[in-house]
Amino acid sequence: MDVTDWVKLAAFIGAGLSMGFGAIGSGAGEGIVGSKACEGMGRQPAVADELLRTMLVGQAVAESTGIYSLVVALLLLFRDFSVVRVIEVPAFLAAGLCMGLGAIGPGVGEGIVGGKACEAIARNPETSPVIVRTMLVGQAVAESTGIYALVVSLLLIFVI
Amino acid sequence: MEGIGKVSQWVFHLGGMRIELNSATLLMTWLIMGLILVFTVLATRRREMVPGPWQHLSELLVGWIKDLCVDALGEQWGKRYYPLICALFIFLLLCNWIGIIPYMDEPTKDLNTTLGLGIMGFFIAHGTAIWVKGPKTYITEYFKPIFFLMPLNVVGELAKVVSISFRLFGNIMGGSIIIIVVSYLAYGLILPPFLYAFFGLFVGTIQAFVFTVLTLVYIAVQIR
């Protein structure tokens, strides 16, 4: 195997690691949001529309670290392999591992925030605008570490 | 597939210096500023007690954002800052939505735009803090609760800029990369328009709102 094959090997393993690990957190988080929304609808059927809207927004935000994982995986898969260097082998492996593992925590955390917001709306429907706003800010802050993982992955892919 | 990571640039040579301008970002930003200008003229020309459609739309939007600002900052500062927050929200909304038109690029797909807006928010928040508290209280707050935590506080403030700008950039760029790859793989007419609607309209609206509210919250944290 020459250098090109090794770099391809690293990029493909990195893409798999990134998307595989990255799917764990977002999946669990979106599941938590969905389950809490079901619970809320059972308790308070009158606010079903409001709950559905909050659930979709909360899940869309909880999914964003999964989208970052997909982006890193696609960038590694569809790379131009005509000019390669040996240093790219560890860099691509590390990029995949970084984004994959880094996506787990924020995904679950954002899911918990979204789930509790659904629960709170079912308990007290009058305050739903404030709850949705607080949910978005809380999810945004919980996502910060996932964004740092994305920054490090992009640096490893493009700058090294 | 050559759409990934491609940046169209104008390159100038000015007195030995090489100047690179991202042409798509610049053109789209100017186009959006023009659109906002047209919208503002339509909304404020011929104002009446019974509002027309444009006036009604703009009154809804401005009133909603004003309530948001007054909630977060209080009566006095909310009224002072809501034009800025309102302009930021409308600009980001149009930036994220313009990608659904073929051959148009989102300016927020370029890190320069989002990082510029993030740094602007940083300076506004800290300038307000110095204005409200005075320089001495502002500096001593970095040495709380214990003086050697000062570097951590400074890094925490700088990390806010990185996270707010990379969140918008990552979501919009991720959406456009996924659309490019799916269009390349599927050659379809059904899936790509659906993805445009999801990433352009839905995620774009949420991320524009998140960016605006976070800027507002950063200002509010500094004032209190």
Image (tube, coloured by chain):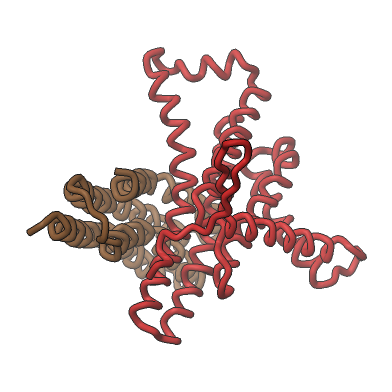
Residue at figure coordinates x 40%, y 67% from the top left: B2
Left or right: where does residue A30 sit relative to residue A120?
left
On the image, the x and y values in percent for residue B70 come to 68, 44
Seen in the picture, residue A59 relative to B110 is either above or below; the reply is: below
Residue at figure coordinates x 68%, y 24% from the top left: B131
- Identify the hue of chain A: brown
Classify residue A7 by image quadrant.
bottom left
Residue at figure coordinates x 71%, y 50% from the top left: B66
Q: Can residue A143 be seen in this view?
A: yes
Quadrant where the N terminus of chain B sits is bottom left
Seen in the picture, residue B149 relative to B9 is either above or below; the reply is: above
Give whichever of A4, A145 is nearer the camera. Answer: A4
Q: Can residue B207 be seen in this view?
A: no
- Identify the hue of chain B: red
**Among all residues in the image, which is located at the extreme bottom?**
B189
Residue at figure coordinates x 47%, y 60% from the top left: B172
On the image, the x and y values in percent for residue B129 come to 61, 26
**Among all residues in the image, which is located at the extreme left?**
A1
On the image, the x and y values in percent for residue B200 come to 52, 68
On the image, the x and y values in percent for residue B191 come to 41, 82
Give whichever of A90, B81 is nearer the camera. Answer: A90
Seen in the picture, residue B114 relative to B53 is either above or below; the reply is: above
